[in-house]
Amino acid sequence: MMKKYYFINKFDANNINKQDKQTVIIYRNYSSEKVSEKIILKIKEYCKKKGNKFYLSNNFKLAIKLNLDGAYIPSFNKSTKHLAYTLKKNFEILGSAHNLKEIKTKELQNVSKIFISSVFKKNNNYLGLNKFKLLKRFTRNNTVALGGISKNNLKKLSLLNQSEFAGISFFE
């Protein structure tokens, strides 16, 4: 069974209901200025009921304060301030990267898994299968495939020896 990471930017019970217990929910909303604690707590409680882990993107302090399962550090966040915080035993730090420099930054930020993108989505950060494999070899950290993953290309992840992937549209 593949472990999956589903990025959401709003609370939608219907979409969360469609996910199995192997799907980790990551809330990332970069459009609104202030993250609503009320919404985060609502998602946390709903995920807990459903048996899904729940992470918050780009707000380490709030993820710790609300006792979430972990935090996600996007590629544009280069800060290491979070290393000064005391974390509970099972708190997990995830992060994303698009190139070797960002991979090394994520290692310095002490992430346990690096989301490397974009594997399939043809955007500014497009890697393709071969560049993904190459970047993956530059880290000892576990890696997660991100970007453009669909039901049609899911089997191609086996070519990358990937058992974990992340996305948005795949889950909707």
Image (cartoon, rainbow, N blue to C red):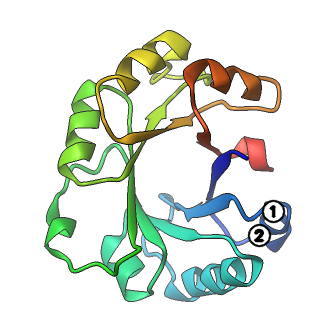
Q: Residue, x 65% and y 50% (percent of image)?
A: 4
- Dividing the picture into quadrants, the one containing residue 54 is bottom right
Which labelled disc corresponds to residue 69?
A: none
Instruction: Decide if residue 128 is on the left or right side of residue 169.
Output: left
- What residue do we see at 70% from left, 72% from top? 11
Q: Quadrant of residue 96?
A: top left
Badge 1: how crowded within 10 Å, few (<14), some, or many (20+)?
few
Secondary structure state at the residue bearing disc 1: helix
Q: Are marks 2 and 1 in contact (CB under 8 Å)?
A: yes
Residue 150 x/y as whole percent: 76, 32
Residue 102 rendering spot, x and y as whole percentages: 27, 35
Q: Is residue 141 above or below residue 13?
A: above
Residue 18, placed above or below residue 113: below
Q: Residues within 10 Å of mark 2 (few under 14, many from 20)?
A: few
Task: Looking at the picture, tell me which residue is in the foreground, 12 or 3.
Answer: 3
Disc 2/disc 1 C-alpha distance (Å): 6 Å
- The image shows a total of numbered marks equal to 2
Residue 10's place in the image compared with 103, above or below, is below
Residue 132 percent across, percent down from the top left: 46, 20
What's the amino acid at mark 2? Asp
Q: Is residue 172 left or right of residue 73?
A: right
Disc 1 marks which amino acid? Asn
Q: Quadrant of residue 18?
A: bottom right
Q: Which residue is mark 1?
A: 15
Q: Residue at x 29, y 25 (%)?
A: 138
Residue at 21% over, 68% down:
82
Q: x, y (%) of residue 134?
A: 39, 15
Q: Secondary structure at mark 2?
A: loop
Closer to the camera in the image, 89 or 47:
89
Kindly identify which residue carries mark 2: 12
